[in-house]
Image (cartoon, rainbow, N blue to C red):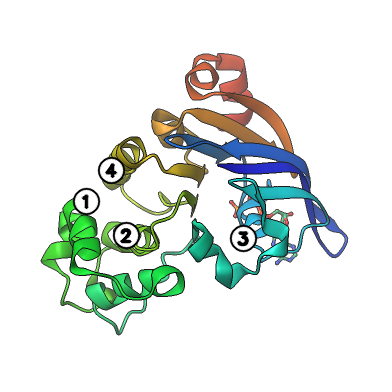
Amino acid sequence: MLTVENLSASYGPVRALDSVSLSAAEGEITAVLGANGAGKTTLLRTISGLVPPAGGEISLAGRDLRRVSTEDLPALGLAHVPEGRGVLAELTVEENLRLGALGARGRATAADLRRIYDLFPALADRKNGLAHVLSGGERQMLVIGRALLSRPKVLLLDEPSLGLAPRIVARIFGLLRGLVHDEGLAVVLVEQNARSALSIADHGVVLNLGQVVVRRDAAALVADDALRHAYLGF
Ligand SMILES: Nc1ncnc2c1ncn2[C@@H]1O[C@H](COP(=O)(O)OP(=O)(O)OP(=O)(O)O)[C@@H](O)[C@H]1O
């Protein structure tokens, strides 16, 4: 569904991505792992057109994304949930969700909203409350739910586990796994929490200094003690 080939990107003299190749298939989660500064966020931002590529190719269902502007991506089926759980704090939970449909499809229908509330019942309980009262885990559910309202084919998720208790991470990742399985979504999951990410991922790609240093099935990566210790810290 999403294919990235030999993608490079720089910030001035800093080469943050160096010829990175990766793909994300329908119904699968590709985890992108690596230390601080490895280039994970830059990879997602370059796919989304927020950082201009210095070279390489990006295609979504065969279409060249380098020629598509960022604001047109939701309509083509690409949703990006950046790090930081940005919600509009003074809007209600439901108003925040409705924003997710706007860029891609116009107005959210009652059925669209019901689908998100079925997936994340905690949001249904708070739908008329202001987003600023949500816990960190609920905010993460809200930004994922908002992205899903555009009915993406590919979902880019940047560090969804950051700062959340392990129990909440397990719950959100479990929901994500179910969603990918049921709806055939292709997910690129950027995480520093390699252990949790690999517990739900199909494939793992490790970045180091902007380059892919390991690419394995998730289970094989977890089973390889030497790789795990060298790159993943668990
Ligand atoms: N806006 C920027 N301007 C200049 N350099 C940047 C900028 N953003 C990132 N970098 C540099 O690019 C490299 C890759 O950073 P990036 O944020 O993509 O890594 P990361 O793997 O996502 O790390 P983190 O987990 O800390 O977000 C680092 O050397 C970083 O310092």
Q: Nearer the viewer, residue 10 or 77?
A: 77
Q: How many callouts does the rendering have? A: 4
- Whether label 1 touches label 2, CB < 8 Å: yes
Q: CA distance from mark 4 to mark 1?
A: 7 Å
- Whether label 4 touches label 1, CB < 8 Å: yes
Does the rendering let one see residue 193?
Answer: yes
Q: Residues within 10 Å of mark 3 (few under 14, many from 20)?
A: many
Q: Residues within 10 Å of mark 4 (few under 14, many from 20)?
A: some
Q: CA distance from mark 1 to mark 2?
A: 8 Å
**The disc label shown at residue 119, or none:** 1
Q: Is mark 2 within 8 Å of ligand 1?
A: no
Q: CA distance from mark 2 to mark 4?
A: 11 Å
Question: To which residue does mark 4 refer?
Answer: 175
Question: To which residue does mark 2 refer?
Answer: 145
Question: To which residue does mark 3 refer?
Answer: 48
Does the rendering let one see residue 158?
Answer: no
Q: Residues within 10 Å of mark 2 (few under 14, many from 20)?
A: many
Tell me which numbered mark, 1 or 2, is placed earlier along the sequence. Answer: 1
Position of residue 101 measured from the top left corner of the image (x, y, whole percent): 37, 70
Tell me which numbered mark, 4 or 1, is placed earlier along the sequence. Answer: 1
Q: Nearer the viewer, residue 22 or 10?
A: 22
| Left or right relative to 214: residue 18 | right
Q: CA distance from mark 3 to mark 1?
A: 26 Å
| Left or right relative to 160: residue 136 | left
